[in-house]
Amino acid sequence: MDESPLPITLVELLWQGRGALAILVSATLASIFAFFSIRSSRKIARVKNASDMLFASKRDDKFVGGMKQLRAYSNDPDVDVAKFAYPDNFLSLEAEHIRYIANHFERVAVCIDNGVFDEKTVKEAWYTMIVNTWPQVEPYVNMLRVQVQHDKRGTHYQAFEALVVRWKKSPLKKK
């Protein structure tokens, strides 16, 4: 009678394959560590990008001046910012100020939407400014959307507008 070998127990199987198991465990742990490191690095990069933009804006004379002018326009009942979207006024200094601010915040919104800037960082620093600036430029934007006949979709400054709508739904919490 032939004796058949006894089945290998799980412990024996693991003991025999301990080298392969060690490699598998090491590779799994390394992959998990790499995943979290990359995720953390991306978050740090988004915060750094947002911080760089915020500090650069303070040194941007066109941005600072444009914000002052926009505030002055909105406080003057005789100034209708929508008129600066008309072809006659489109190249005026006033229209340039409005466009510069609207373009700036549109780029900020696009960068937030695409993960270039950390939204929480920008929101904590600029919530009030961004939310309060939209109503000041909105008449200009709406008139611009009407004036540009070839673009019937009205997509001018849509990321800026969407950001304001999103932030108003979830306002900054008092600390």
Image: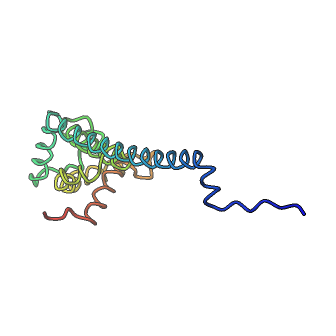
Q: In this view, does 64 lie above or below 167?
A: above
- Viewport quadrant of the N terminus: bottom right
Q: Horizontal and vertical percent for residue 92? A: 21, 35
Q: Nearer the viewer, residue 150 or 8?
A: 8
- Residue 51 image point, x, y percent: 22, 41
Q: In this view, does 33 lie to the left or right of 2?
A: left
User: Furthest residue to the front?
Assistant: 1
Please report the residue visible at 23 percent of the width from the left and 47 percent of the height from the top. 83
Point out residue 84 in the picture as x, y percentages from the top left corner. Answer: 24, 44
Residue ID at (34%, 42%): 41
Quadrant including the C terminus: bottom left
- Image mark count: 0
Q: Residue pushed farthest right?
A: 1
User: Which residue lies at the image location 16% right of the left edge and 56% below the top edge?
Assistant: 128
Question: Which residue is nearer to you in this view: 129 or 141?
Answer: 129
- In this image, 137 relative to 45: left or right? left
Residue lying at 27% horizontally and 57% vertically, measured from the top left: 164
Which quadrant holds residue 93? top left
Q: Which of 100 and 20 is in front in this view?
A: 20
Q: In which quarter of the image is residue 120?
A: bottom left
Estimate the x, y position of residue 158 in percent, counting from the top left.
Answer: 36, 52
Q: Which colour scheme is used?
A: rainbow
In this rendering, position of residue 157 left or right of residue 70? right
